[in-house]
Amino acid sequence: MPVLPKSLRAVLGCAWVSTFVLRGIVFGNGASPPAHPSESARNHWAFQPVRRPPIPVVQDPSAVRNPIDAFVLARLQARGWTPAPPASRPALLRRVHLDLAGIPPTLQEQERFALDPSPVCLDRVTDDLLSRPSYGERWARHWLDLVRYADSNGYERDAEKPFVWRYRDYVIGALIADRPYDQFLREQLAGDELPQVRAETLVATTFARLGHWDDEPADPAADRFDQLDDIVSTTSQAILGLTLGCARCHDHKFEPLTSADYYRMVAVFAPLQRPQNGRTELTLPLGSPAEREAVAQRDREIAALQRRTNELSAESIATRVASLRREVPDLPAGYIFHETGGTVPPTHVLVRGNPGRPGDAVTAGVPAVLPGLGWTAPRAEGSASGRRRALVDWMVSPDNPLTARVIVNRVWQQHFGAGLVRTASDFGVMGEPPTHPELLDWLAHWFVHDAGWSLKALHRLILASNTWRMGRAHQPVPAAEDPENRLLWHQPYRRLEVEALRDSVLAVSGELNRQSGGRGVFLPIPKAAMEANTDKESIWSTSPYDQAARRTVYAFVKRGLVVPMLEVLDLCDTVSSSPRRQVTTVAPQALTLFNGEFINQQAACLADRILREVGTDPARQVDHLSRLALGRPPSASERDAYLGFLEAVEPQTPRDRLVQVARVILNLNEFAYPE
């Protein structure tokens, strides 16, 4: 099969277009798709109510720290297997820091942990990490992957999305505050329709406007539906684990989802409008209704003053305008959609997804495969249609079988490298079934009814389990029969994502800037990466060194010019929802991490840190290096190798040799993996 151009591959990334194009290739233009799924698909496990199953009884109750262990052990014991022994205490400390904060423990944190033999010591570390800003900065990136966050629009001009970073900061803040997940969703889908509207809830609705956007589309009508498709596809995948976007052109080929289902969801978001002036995107003021009305009234008074140029001097006008602006200051600007009120045009099923071929009209609603789950017809209030609020009320109903299952599976995936359902954004018929269905349902029910939708409570439960605390010891029989570790007989190997890897380098070198929030920072980009751009001077303006040393979650993500280090180390797709990072192993990664400017620069900073903190004694230097980077002292063979190099004579200086040892340690597999 010939390789498609990158631009066409990006288009084909949209499921409905891919289906539409392949339909013409495989079945012939105008041919019918395969038969609709049978009625039995409606009985699929994921569409059934969540019920809490009984906790299994295991042979050795002492091996159970919480119910997670009972469910996992029961499956292993049924095969005659035993789980891997626990990881070492230093390894667990490093693992929990990298899982929750994305940076390794400091020397002081290592020493404090070593002096506390209490069996609940790691639980206390977990609580401490969950209270830190670094937890929000680490876990926000997982959510940003799902909602296709980037700082620019993509397409030819790829303009910056003004103030979109406020949404990123909202997500970080909501996670730090442990906003209940149901409220987290309410704010993002309907923050402008809630009883208490404020600046934060309006910022949350940036969720709908995050997608790529063509500021000069060839077909405005088609572009409008492309925007709605982006919202519907992202919402259904990220929150419900459904590939509803595949039903844009015809009933879903494999799932019990119809085109009518798809367009009912389109109707939910159809009242949203993009503030713009031609190709220029506009922002809206953020605040409570009273605050926004005060600013609107101020602006009306200013406009009235400025029309009185024949009566008042330009100077009584300027003075009075300045006074009004002091009395009622501007509100912060937000990158959000809005509803303008009035009659919403009807939504039609589009024949083969073509805006020029409207079919039957549909009302706002949800997939019919999930009936009787508390969907309440939208109720308009003021300028808001109430449709998105009705949708999110339905989503977070305790009776909804998908929302809680999907999010607990996503959290599990980040802690174990793979979810209990390995197709994390596809809980449909074509997705993989859960490896531990009873455990998934127990967690989902507990999350809603016991934890009150608290993500921090879910983290505590998972990290307190013996299952998460297992080591990676190899066992021949389970390895042969379950090489993918589906039954969780050991802790899997997981490489750090590029953000955690880069942040860990900065933390160990002592250069990490902990400043939070604000507009994205522009990381250094090699000149060669910008050669193809016609406007090399203005397309990318690298931030000062101290700003570029901030956590990677604050890096500016430009869809048309991804920082090469981030791209080569598997940054997520920035166009559509990404349920899981790809993990590739290719030569450019080794070149980037060993020869790249960033690592060499940070290796020098790390060497200087070592010289400052322990002086010139080679033995103390290598011990300090290993503890900082790996959370442990060097082994005897490692110490001999490092010392042999450091104590060599010509041609390098002692500092130069220390820099090279630091560079080697930053490139160890052990540094790039939680332990």
Image (spheres, rainbow, N blue to C red):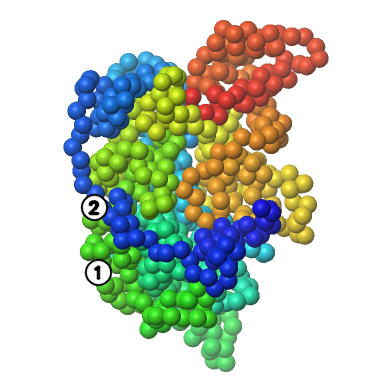
Q: Position of residue 400 (x, y in %)?
A: 27, 56
Q: CA distance from mark 2 to mark 1?
A: 19 Å
Disc 2 target residue: 49
In this rendering, is residue 418 above or below 233?
Answer: above
Residue at the spot 49% in from the left edge and 86% down from the top edge: 304
Kind of residue sitting beneath label 1: Thr
Q: Position of residue 144 (x, y in %)?
A: 48, 50
Q: What SS does tag 1 mark?
A: loop
Disc 1 target residue: 376
In this rendered view, identify the residue nearer to me: 531 or 519. Answer: 531
Kind of residue sitting beneath label 2: Pro
Q: Earlier in the sequence, mark 2 or mark 1?
A: 2
Give the number of the mark in front: 2 or 1: 2
Q: Position of residue 19 (x, y in %)?
A: 53, 62
Q: Position of residue 617 (x, y in %)?
A: 63, 9
In this rendered view, identify the residue nearer to me: 666 or 537. Answer: 666
| Contact between labelled residues 1 and 2, with CB atoms less than 8 Å apart | no
Crowding at dot 1, Cα within 10 Å, few <14 / some 14-19 / many 20+, comes out as: few
User: Left or right: 65 with respect to 639?
Assistant: left
Residue at the spot 60% in from the left edge and 76% down from the top edge: 219
Q: Is residue 290 visible?
A: no
Residue at the spot 51% in from the left edge and 60% down from the top edge: 15
